[in-house]
Image: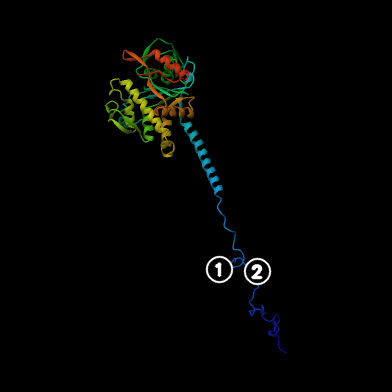
């Protein structure tokens, strides 16, 4: 008897080949497709090999980018970065302000009026300058510091006005309290040049002297020295000026031709210090100082500086490091001061010298009637109609 291995179907017992009735015999390898879960009409998951590519799904359908959501989150990110940068910049800048002037030490002050009055002072301080820098900037090497520029800037709702106070103005030194000693010095009727007040007892006595001789309340004080001034000009990339005529001055190092030109820090300092080249030395110099400071404020506040971090931060650093202000001066006040000076340079404000009427002993006498009218217009925040020299 023939032996048949277990599990093996004898050939004669195997089922016949499947016939679909259309004359297509399917052999042993036929697969109905049901054992794989294949659904007809869908591409096969197996990406390779031959065949017509139909079979199970190959993956998720492609998504269309949600541009609204992308734009929304991009805007949120940009705003967040801007806010954080602004806050950090504010606290950084605020920490660099040298609030060394204490106006609470000024005694017998006039009442404050409407608007805001800034006393802006440029000194001949050489603090922190090397011997090479002093030589380059023609500053000399005098010890201490004296006022080289003094201006009152009034800001208000009826326009901004910048008034230069000639350093040779004849004034009375009033009673005052020593800024360091705290000692009370009486009024002896002593008359001298205005710039002597600062040399005698610093910013507090200068403010006291200006207030006493004008009757105007000074709200804020800002001071800058030679080196800081030149540094700011260089940081903004220079300031363009259109000079009506050229002039030279060996004392300041000035050597200018007429016409448009961009002044760097060294040239700018020479420009605002020059006095020996003019017949009306002090008055012409104050006019030049007004014109330049207004142009500098315009450059500092321009988009080319504000929107360029590579220029903005060096400018802020140079300015804030060298500025000395009163204890109540905020960055907002400082910004308002610069914007007001910009408005003056743009023609929206007015610049003038303090009205004078003759001289005595080489000192300029103020026109008391005009000064009184000017102060009244400042206190009432009225449009200034007074004219100066």
Q: Which residue corresponds to mark 2?
A: 36
Q: Which structural element holds mark 1?
A: loop
Q: Quadrant of the C terminus?
A: top left
Residue 247: % across, % down: 27, 27
| Label 2: few (<14), some (14–19) or many (≥20) C-alpha neighbours in 10 Å | few
Residue lying at the far bottom in this picture: please name it: 1
Q: Quadrant of the N terminus?
A: bottom right
Counting labels gives: 2
Q: Which residue corresponds to mark 1?
A: 48
Residue 253: % across, % down: 29, 28
| Label 1: few (<14), some (14–19) or many (≥20) C-alpha neighbours in 10 Å | few
Q: Residue at x 71, y 83 (%)?
A: 13
Q: Nearer the viewer, residue 297 or 40?
A: 40
Q: Which structural element holds mark 2?
A: helix
Distance between the alpha carbons at the discs numbered 2 and 1 = 17 Å
Confirm or deny contact between disc 2 and disc 1 (CB under 8 A). Answer: no
Sequence order check, earlier mark of 2 and 1? 2
Q: Nearer the viewer, residue 98 or 17?
A: 17
Q: In this orientation, does residue 128 appear?
A: no
């Amino acid at each position: 008897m023939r032996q048949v291995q277990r599990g093996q179907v004898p050939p004669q017992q195997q089922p016949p080949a499947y016939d679909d009735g259309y004359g297509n015999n399917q052999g042993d390898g036929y697969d109905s497709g049901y054992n794989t879960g294949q659904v007809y009409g869908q591409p096969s998951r197996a990406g390779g090999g031959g065949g017509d590519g139909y079979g199970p799904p190959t993956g998720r359908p492609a998504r269309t980018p949600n541009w609204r959501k992308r734009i929304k989150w991009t805007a949120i990110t940009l705003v967040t970065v801007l806010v954080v940068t602004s806050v950090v910049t504010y606290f950084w800048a605020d920490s660099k302000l040298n609030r060394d002037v204490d106006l609470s030490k000024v005694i017998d002050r006039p009442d404050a009026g409407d608007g805001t009055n800034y006393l802006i002072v440029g000194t001949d301080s050489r603090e922190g300058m090397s011997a090479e820098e002093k030589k380059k900037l023609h500053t000399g090497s005098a010890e201490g510091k004296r006022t080289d520029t003094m201006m009152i800037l009034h800001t208000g709702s009826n326009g901004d006005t910048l008034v230069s106070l000639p350093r040779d103005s004849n004034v009375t030194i009033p009673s005052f309290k020593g800024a360091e000693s705290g000692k009370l010095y009486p009024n002896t009727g002593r008359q001298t040049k205005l710039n002597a007040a600062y040399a005698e007892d610093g910013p507090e006595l200068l403010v006291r002297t200006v207030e006493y001789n004008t009757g105007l309340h000074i709200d804020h004080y800002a001071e800058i020295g030679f080196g800081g001034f030149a540094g700011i000009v260089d940081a903004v990339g220079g300031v363009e000026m259109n000079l009506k005529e050229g002039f030279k001055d060996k004392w300041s190092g000035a050597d200018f031709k007429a016409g448009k030109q961009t002044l760097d820090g060294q040239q700018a300092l020479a420009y605002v210090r020059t006095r020996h080249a003019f017949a009306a030395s002090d008055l012409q110099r104050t006019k030049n100082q007004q014109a330049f400071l207004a142009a500098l404020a315009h450059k500092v506040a321009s988009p080319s500086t504000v929107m360029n971090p590579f220029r903005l931060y060096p400018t802020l650093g140079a300015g804030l490091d060298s500025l000395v202000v009163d204890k109540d001066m905020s960055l907002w006040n400082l910004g308002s001061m610069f914007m007001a000076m910009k408005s003056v340079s743009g023609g929206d404000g007015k610049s003038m010298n303090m009205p004078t009427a003759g001289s005595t002993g080489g000192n300029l006498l103020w026109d008391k009637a005009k000064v009184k009218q000017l102060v009244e217009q400042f206190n009432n925040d009225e449009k200034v109609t007074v004219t100066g020299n």
